[in-house]
Amino acid sequence: MRAVDKAYNAVRDGILAGRFAPASRITEQEIALAAGVSRTPVREALRRLHAEGLVDFTPNQGAVVTEWSTEDADEIFHLRAMLESYGAERAAVRATAAQIGELRALAEQQHDESLHRRPGYLERIGDLNNRFHRRLQEAAGSGRLSRALAALLEAPLVMKTFLNYSADDLQRSAAHHLELVRALEARDGEWAASVMRSHVLAARRTLKHSRTGEAS
């Protein structure tokens, strides 16, 4: 692995895992030590992370972990609702039988995890969910769409959404994925787009309530 990729992964994983808190300063030296690289690739890694919206550069402080406001969250989820529903509509007419089969397997595994909630289930659900959404993007067959969604789907507040889910929320999310697969199997783009929009906006509502202290 290249030195810049090591530095990039060290910071990105730290942000997503919560080791680097929002608004906290990240120094080139600590990243270099953590990743086992020099400071030169660290600078390039930080530029990549800035382009993806994970860090900001503040005068006299350097790199600072991006802090997500309620407005930021609303914008991200509304953009996802538009773009991912479009992707689901495309996938309904472009996905191969093999791609739909893989999506069904992922959706069924997520549904099983949401019902039984065995130790470590949140991490497994998060991984299954991410794989499902990325496979759906691939099935949509649009490189432009995938590039537009990349930063939105990897925003820390999106990656951590499942930490705020109740048992009912987890089952609802899994049920949405199963319904999406049924829409793809039926080759019904309007159905797929409608389910995806509901799916993303339901996630937004859950996250919004968790940030304001309301019950979801």
Image (cartoon, rainbow, N blue to C red):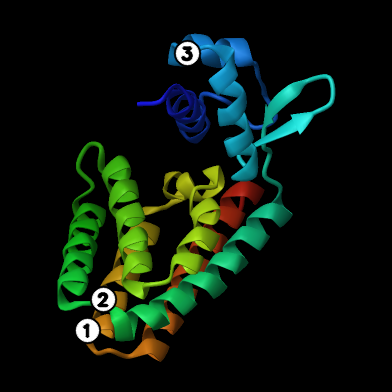
> Where is residue 212 drawn, in percent x and y?
66, 50
Quarter of the rendering containing residue 67: top right
Neighbours of disc 3 within 10 Å: few (<14), some (14-19), many (20+): some
Residues tagged 3 and 2 counted as in contact (Cβ below 8 A): no
N-terminal label among 3 and 1: 3
> Where is residue 40 drawn, in percent x and y?
59, 18
Closer to the camera in the image, 132 or 197: 132
- The residue pinned by badge 1 equals 185
The residue at the point 31 percent across, 41 percent down is 123
In this rendering, position of residue 50 left or right of residue 152: right
Neighbours of disc 2 within 10 Å: few (<14), some (14-19), many (20+): many
The residue at the point 49 percent across, 48 percent down is 154
* Amino acid type assigned to the residue bearing label 2 in the image: Val
N-terminal label among 3 and 2: 3
In this rendering, position of residue 21 left or right of residue 19: right
- The residue pinned by badge 2 equals 181
In this rendering, position of residue 104 left or right of residue 80: left
* Closer mark to the observer between disc 3 and disc 2: 3
Tell me the CA gap for discs 3 and 1. 48 Å
> Where is residue 166 drawn, in percent x and y?
40, 53
Residues tagged 2 and 1 counted as in contact (Cβ below 8 A): yes
- The residue pinned by badge 3 equals 37
In this rendering, position of residue 5 left or right of residue 171: right
